Image (spheres, grey):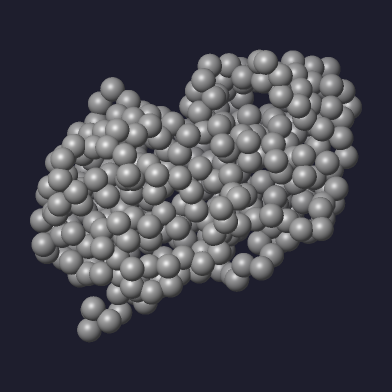
Amino acid sequence: MDITLKNGITPRGRVTLPPSKSEAIRAALLLALAGDDPMRAAEGFPAPYCGDLSSALKAAGDLRSAHAGESAALMRMLMPVQAALFGRISVGADGALLNRGFGELERCFGVSLEPLGGRIETRVNIRRKRRFTIDCSRTSQFLSGLLIALPLLDRECAITVENRLVSQPYAEMTLDFVRLFGGAVERTETGYRTFPSRYAAPETIPVTGDASYAAVFEAMDLLGGEVETVGGSFATRQPDAEFLRCASERDVDITDCPDLLPLLAAVACGREGETVIHGTARLRTKESDREAATVKLIRDLGGAAEAGSDRVTVRGSGGLAGGVCDSLNDHRIAFAAAVLAQICRAPVTVKNAGCTEKSAPGFWEDYGRLTADERR
């Protein structure tokens, strides 16, 4: 699906946020492990849910032979849970997700995880294992899976975090949810220690509005929009809630909030001068090579940006020419393209715009309402 956006438009209005994917995926898995209804993870939020959350709700209903859809977070958290519960990993996935690598978990469990026919299928014997070392320099999602899974075992276990822990707020979010459901986990000097636990669902499931989605409209506001978001929370652990702080800096490290790269780069285009965004190299294995895709987006619309040495540099001029760009089937690139249309001198055509279904199936509807008056 291709969409052409009017240039120089000012979005105005109110948007209700969908549930946080990161919170709801963790809640759905823990609800299933507690013997409760995984649908409670989306309680109070109207359907339709995004692709990743829909996959999580379905997978939580069939943990033994689950399908992760296109959600890397879900797949990486499911694998340790399956190993602890069933002594085997059996998970399917769509698109290129199975090609994004499992080396961290392979080394941790001492197994080979080779995809075959769209699935990973292998036995995993961790019944006598008490010590688990996990490399967290690329992602914290395998660690989150271990934090959920190891309290299910009948013994005390130690997790050693190897190399720098990236996206630490997501690990903290997992720890909060595990403890809320009754999991016994404590921090140590080298990582974590888990103790045998029985999960029980709390009366209230603290899933809040999606800060990643809110950031799209915050970016629009920084470029002249007037959009109010409803349903967010100041108490959330979601690192993308730091968007406005990050966007105010000309030299910013996104190691803990990597998904903000395209939006931060878009905002940087709207002001004059250089902005340097650090911690971008690991984004090369997202839905797209998001580091390169962000640079391409800006250049395709007439801006100046470059990538190198784990950073993206944007040379903003306050406006862009416009033209044709491609989301490369990456929802966050499509969001950034919609934001950039505000500062373009000609309309913007976004190719493969339907990829926003992954995280926000209502995005183009929301965008249409926010820009309806100016499109007449």
Kindly tell me whether residue 352 is visible in this rendering.
no
**Residue 370, placed above or below residue 65:** below
Q: Residue at x 38, y 60 (%)?
A: 217
Q: Locate residue 192, reporting x and y percent.
A: 71, 23
**In the depicted view, which residue is nearer to us: 203 or 102?**
203
Instruction: Name the residue furthest bottom.
Output: 376
Residue 111 figure quarter: top right
Q: Residue at x 31, y 39 (%)?
A: 249
Q: Locate residue 211, reporting x and y percent.
A: 50, 53
Left/right placement of residue 256 relative to residue 83 reads left
**Residue 97, placed above or below residue 219:** above
Q: Locate residue 285, reporting x and y percent.
A: 41, 34
Residue 369 figure quarter: bottom left
Left/right placement of residue 151 relative to residue 139 reads right
Q: Locate residue 202, reporting x and y percent.
A: 81, 53
**Residue 6, placed above or below residue 155:** below
**Residue 44, placed above or below residue 59:** below
Residue 116 figure quarter: top right
